[in-house]
Image: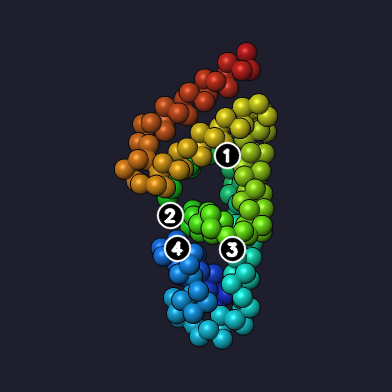
């Protein structure tokens, strides 16, 4: 049986959900409390302000990104897994990314920008270890394109065949660079 999230996690989940589904302006403390099923006072006990919710999201991004990069590092072919994992799948990290991107589009949140940079650095480090510093940015940008297209509209997402062709092309590029 899955473990129930703590009240703090449930409030942060509600914050992410409101931001993703309704936009950053709709993510008032009252709206987040209602979505989480807690009183506004209960929300304020765990997160004393909206900025504290943003800080909580930054912490969540750091944790999820570090966990994902570590899992990627343990893969036999981290580059292929990274590319295949670039399609938006509505996972916890995907939801956190979307919420963070929405928040930084309209407001200045240095902690979110820094957390996103740390996640990106973690992924790029794993990729660079696998294929070298010169090709890691190329793979990262391909991944960003796949992620963006699949996140904008599922109809724009590359097919599984397209993704496998991209993986094969990257393998070919890496092989040629090493020769």
Label 1 Cα crowd, 10 Å radius (few <14 / some 14-19 / many 20+): few
Q: Which of marks 4 and 3 is nearer the N terminus?
A: 4
Q: Which of the 4 quarters of the picture holds residue 126?
A: top right
Q: Earlier in the sequence, mark 2 or mark 3?
A: 3
Q: Mark 3 points at which residue?
A: 57
Secondary structure of the residue carrying numbered label 4: loop
| Label 2, label 1: how far apart the Cα atoms are | 22 Å
Q: Where is residue 166 in the image (x, y as percent from the top left)?
A: 45, 28
Q: Which of marks 1 and 3 is nearer the N terminus?
A: 3
Residue 126 position (above or below residue 174): below
Q: Where is residue 37 in the image (x, y as percent from the top left)?
A: 45, 81
| Label 4, label 3: how far apart the Cα atoms are | 15 Å
Q: Residue at x 36, y 31 (%)?
A: 161
Residue 100 visible in the displayed image = no
Residue 14 position (above or below residue 99): below
Secondary structure of the residue carrying numbered label 1: loop
Mark 2 vs mark 3: give the one in front. 3
Mark 2 vs mark 1: give the one in front. 2
Q: Quadrant of the C terminus?
A: top right
Label 3 Cα crowd, 10 Å radius (few <14 / some 14-19 / many 20+): many
Q: Name the residue under label 2.
A: 90
Q: Earlier in the sequence, mark 4 or mark 1?
A: 4
Q: Earlier in the sequence, mark 2 or mark 1?
A: 1
Q: Which residue is drawn at 67% across and 39% down?
A: 125
**Nearest to the observer: residue 171 or residue 17:** 17
Q: Which of marks 4 and 2 is nearer the N terminus?
A: 4
Q: Position of residue 152 (x, y in %)?
A: 39, 47
**Nearest to the observer: residue 5 or residue 98:** 98
């Amino acid at each position: 049986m899955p473990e129930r999230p703590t009240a703090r996690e449930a409030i942060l989940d509600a914050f992410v959900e409101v931001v993703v589904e309704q936009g950053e302006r709709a993510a008032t403390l009252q709206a987040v409390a209602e979505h989480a099923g807690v009183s506004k006072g209960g929300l304020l006990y765990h997160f004393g302000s909206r900025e504290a919710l943003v800080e909580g999201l930054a912490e969540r991004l750091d944790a999820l990104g570090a966990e994902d990069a570590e899992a990627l590092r343990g893969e036999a072919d981290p580059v292929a897994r990274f590319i295949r994992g670039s399609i938006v799948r509505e996972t916890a990290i995907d939801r956190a990314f979307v919420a963070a991107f929405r928040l930084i589009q309209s407001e200045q949140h240095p902690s979110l920008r820094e957390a996103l940079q740390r996640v990106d650095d973690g992924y790029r480090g794993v990729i660079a270890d696998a294929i070298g510093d010169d090709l890691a940015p190329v793979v990262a940008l391909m991944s960003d394109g796949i992620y963006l297209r699949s996140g904008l509209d599922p109809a724009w997402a590359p097919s599984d065949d397209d993704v496998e062709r991209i993986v094969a092309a990257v393998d070919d590029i890496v092989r040629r660079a090493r020769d």
